[in-house]
Image: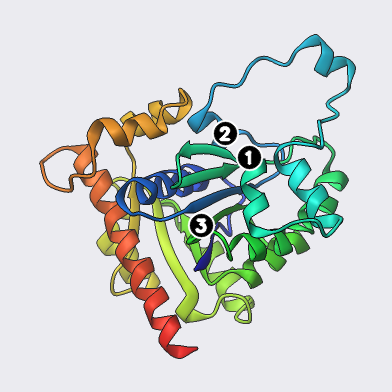
Amino acid sequence: MAIISFWSASEKETGQTLAATAFATYLGIKHNYKILLVDATFHDDVMERCFWKIATQTAVNKLNRGKMDISSGAEGLVSAVASNKITPEIITNFTRVVLKNRLDVLCGLKTEIRDNFTKSLMLYKDLVTIADKYYDMVLVDLEKTLKADTTRALLETSHLIVTDFTQNYKQFEEYFGAISANKNIFKKDIVIPLLTNADECSKYNVKNVSRVLKEKSLNTVLYNPVFKDAASEAGVANFFLRYGLSTTGNDKNADFIKALDELDKTIEYRLEELKYKV
């Protein structure tokens, strides 16, 4: 149905992975969709830790110098793509289940060697294209900036690109610079700006940022310490199951859910628009 990438022009922390993870989990609970959340970042286990506790590296792993079992996880899937032995249905054999028949996660490549990561990630363009035939929605958490050709390739494959930034003027400038310099990638109808870790007490509140970016409406993922704590304790799924999907009520959790609901509506609207343009 759709490949949607989360990407930032800034190398600084933006909360991009937590935003992608929160949105994927929200969708998995709200809709009867089959969703794949893909970690395409280098040497970063933030997404995995949102759902599962990671055991301390064992002595055996240390002796193996970080070599991974290529029969499982992202490594196994990359191997299947490289050998042309992959079908949409097979992808589920290499993912981890968060919500049965609703949300699967492809955790990041485990290598700590940049060249090996880049070589494997070059196959992700084919991987997500094949996954798009099985899943209703494929959400990809990309490396920041456009320094890597692999990032560009995945952005070019995406139906929509969610470009995130925080309440920081330098990040607004980086966003403008990247968008204007790469119009062949960031076509206006597929780009969705997203203000992450948003706090209305900031000078750069939604109203002011919308004016700066010349956006009539701006989607946000609000700063929420309860969600942030849950993400650090492998409790993201439990956060949504505990607080539900209610957008009513005068509390930060309801406001957080409401912002995700608005992002959901924006994406649905954009996808519908694109369908009519094809």
Residue at image mark 2: 48
Q: Quadrant of residue 208?
A: bottom left
As drawn, the label of residue 198 is none
Element under disc 1: loop
Q: Position of residue 46 (x, y in %)?
A: 57, 34
Q: Is residue 201 visible?
A: no
Horizontal side of 89 relative to 171 (left or right) equals: right
Task: Indicate which disc, 3 or 1, sits on the residue closer to the N terminus.
Answer: 1
Residue at image location 73% in from the left, 40% down from the top: 109
Residue receiving disc 1? 107
Identify residue type, mark 3. Answer: Gln
Identify residue type, mark 2.
Answer: Glu
Marks 2 and 3 sit apart, C-alpha to C-alpha, by: 26 Å
First in residue order: circle 2 vs circle 1: 2
Judging by the rendered image, the residue that carries numbered circle 3 is 171
Q: Amino acid at mark 1?
A: Cys
Instruction: Using residue 251 as the reference point, say whether residue 224 is left or right of it.
Output: right
Residue 68 at least partly seen: yes
Q: CA distance from mark 3 to mark 1?
A: 27 Å
Under tag 2, what secondary structure? helix
Labels 2 & 1 near each other (Cβ < 8 A): yes
Q: How many marks?
A: 3
The residue positioned 28% from the left and 60% from the top of the image is: 262
Spatial CA distance of label 2 from label 1 is 6 Å
Residue at 63%, 81% (x, y): give it.
184
Residue in the foreground of this view, choosing between 79 and 264: 79
